[in-house]
Image: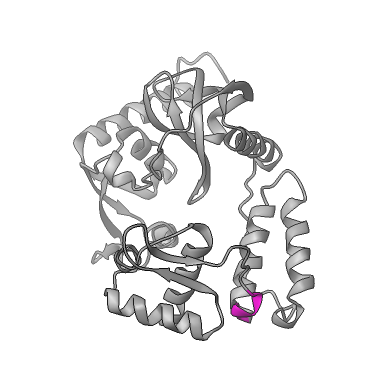
Amino acid sequence: MKIDRLIGILSVLLQEEKVTAPELAERFEVSRRTINRDIDDLLYAGIPIRTAQGTGGGISIAEGYKMDRTILTSKDMQMILAGLRSLDSVSGSSYYGQLMEKIQVRSSEFISGRESILIDLSSWYKNTLAPKISTIQDAIENRHLLEFYYYAQSGEGKRTIEPYYVVFKWTSWYVYGWCLKRKDYRLFKLNRMDQVKETIKDFSCRNAPVPNLSSELKYPRNIVLKAIFTPDMKWRLVEEFGPGCYEELEDGRLLLIRNYADMDNLTMWMLTFGDKVEVIEPQELRKRLKTMAESMIKMYGGKNNGRN
């Protein structure tokens, strides 16, 4: 939409000292002529934009200009406040709550008081999670190395990283940074981190890429699962994969066919269904579940387990 592009162009101009029309055209995927018309519209709206031709020229905005909050609609303000509330749910301080109060006081004509969207990003580990996020944010802002003890599937040990991003992906929090041990960018899950500490050691900021959170790129889904679930497990399949993810068989059972990347995680997931699922493929998973079931029978119900 044009209004979205105009706000986007204004945001770019407020953040960058100067930009060219071709750069804006490429960024917003429109023609240079469209960008020129957009600049004219912003000028007509009273925004002090300056243009300069020739070498070293470009488009800029008058120094000291601040965007008038009236450019935001009531819906815009509600979305901003919903976002701030979501951050406050994991914040170890009252910073976001105070920021919300400032916005509400200055924008009362836009806010009806009716909250239609509530987002809570906290987890069962909120008491330990908030201090970690606060420490990581401080390390990022101060450009200090971050140290912590990490528990991973491949082993555990001390890690030191150059932190760049705090990431929330689906239901978990991560820190993304350059790992001094692996000599590469890594994503670390906060719930697996302990003894998180901001050091006093500075680091030179790299041109760190935005983390690619697509698991398919990092972990190819080469494992094909074929499993049959009992009808009373339909709600779980729908919750995790959406309606239409299964094929209903003649006897009412549900056939699920999906690709997975990690056999260990898939095994643990299958165990959560107990006797409500039968794995057809892959054979390796069937063998794993059979071995684990035999071990549990020996532990809990075997004749020679030495327990009553």
Q: Quadrant of residue 279?
A: top left
Relative to residue 271, is residue 88 drawn left or right? Answer: right
Q: Nearer the viewer, residue 20 or 102?
A: 20
Q: Nearer the viewer, residue 282 or 123?
A: 123
Image coordinates of residue 262 in percent, x first then y, are 31, 36
Work out which quarter of the rendered image holds the C terminus and state it.
top right
Residue at 56%, 17% in the rendered image: 307
Residue at 56%, 67% in the rendered image: 62
Count the marks: 0
Rendering coords of residue 179 (x, y %): 43, 25
Q: Is residue 116 visible?
A: no
Q: Position of residue 125 (x, y in %)?
A: 65, 40
Residue 222 appears in the rendering = yes
User: In the rendered image of this protein, does residue 274 appear above or below residue 36?
Assistant: above
* Residue 199 to residue 90: above or below: above
Task: Give coordinates of residue 8: x percent, y percent.
Answer: 46, 69
Does the magenta portion include 97? no
Tell whether 208 sits left or right of 168. Answer: left
Residue shown at the point (35%, 36%) measured from the top left: 267
Work out whether 47 lies above or below 225.
below
Q: Which residue occupies 54% across, 84% down?
A: 45
**Which quadrant of the rendered structure holds the N terminus?**
bottom left
Q: Which residues are magenta?
A: 68-73
Q: Residue 109: name its quadrant.
A: bottom right
Q: Nearer the viewer, residue 274 or 45?
A: 45
